[in-house]
Image: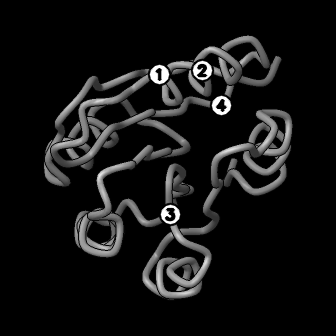
Amino acid sequence: MDKPIRVLVAKPGLDGHDRGAKVVARALRDAGMEVIYTGLRQTPEEIVNAAIQEDVDVVACSILSGAHSTLLPKIAKLLKAEGADDILFVGGGVIPADDIPFLKENGCAEIFTPGTPTTVTIDYIKANVKK
């Protein structure tokens, strides 16, 4: 029996709104994944440490604060520095389309914006997680 995909859902920075992250976390759980939710206002270092300690397959960050171009690349760099760049790293939230290529060039495998069906996120993770 295959072990379930383990996903860390995180809210980096000062963003205080987590309804979307909780919706995604629940959808991932309902799809058979194990989900660890870190809660609000996590630093990149806390997110990476939790990902390593929890031995996750995926880090999924939800960010609405506008700090995505700073925080998401920092998380990707820290994952790489810790030798954990085999963890699939995705982001989502209110992120302008013009910023997505920069984020992908700087370590985010995919970005999911508002209105993306949770099935799209689930299918992407299943197709791209490194097992």
| Labelled pair 4, 2 in contact (Cβ < 8 Å) | no
Q: What amino acid does circle 4 point to?
A: Ile
Which residue position is annotated with label 2? 23
**Residue visible at 74% across and 11% down in the picture:** 30
> Counting residues from the N terminus, which is met first, the one under dot 4 or under dot 1?
4
Which residue position is annotated with label 4? 5
Whether residue 10 is visible to the viewer of this picture, yes or no, is: yes
In the rendered image, which quarter is residue 10 located in? top left
Question: Crowdedness of circle 2 by 10 Å Cα count: few (<14), some, many (20+)?
Answer: few
Most foreground residue, 31 or 113:
113
Q: What amino acid does circle 3 point to?
A: Ile
**Residue visible at 34% across and 29% down in the picture:** 17
> Counting residues from the N terminus, which is met first, the one under dot 3 or under dot 2?
2
Asked which secondary structure carries label 3, the reply is: loop
Which residue position is annotated with label 3? 95
| Labelled pair 1, 2 in contact (Cβ < 8 Å) | yes
The label shown at residue 19 is 1
**Residue visible at 64% across and 64% down in the picture:** 110
Most foreground residue, 39 or 85:
39
> Counting residues from the N terminus, which is met first, the one under dot 4 or under dot 2?
4
Quadrant where the image shows the N terminus: top right
Asked which secondary structure carries label 2, the reply is: helix
Asked which secondary structure carries label 1, the reply is: helix
In the rendered image, which quarter is residue 40 located in? top left
The number of numbered badges drawn on the structure is: 4
> Counting residues from the N terminus, which is met first, the one under dot 3 or under dot 4?
4
Most foreground residue, 67 or 5:
67
Q: What amino acid does circle 1 point to?
A: Arg
Question: Crowdedness of circle 4 by 10 Å Cα count: few (<14), some, many (20+)?
Answer: many
Query: Is residue 33 placed above or below 108 in the rendered structure?
Result: above
Q: What amino acid does circle 2 point to?
A: Val
Q: Position of residue 69 (x, y in %)?
A: 33, 75
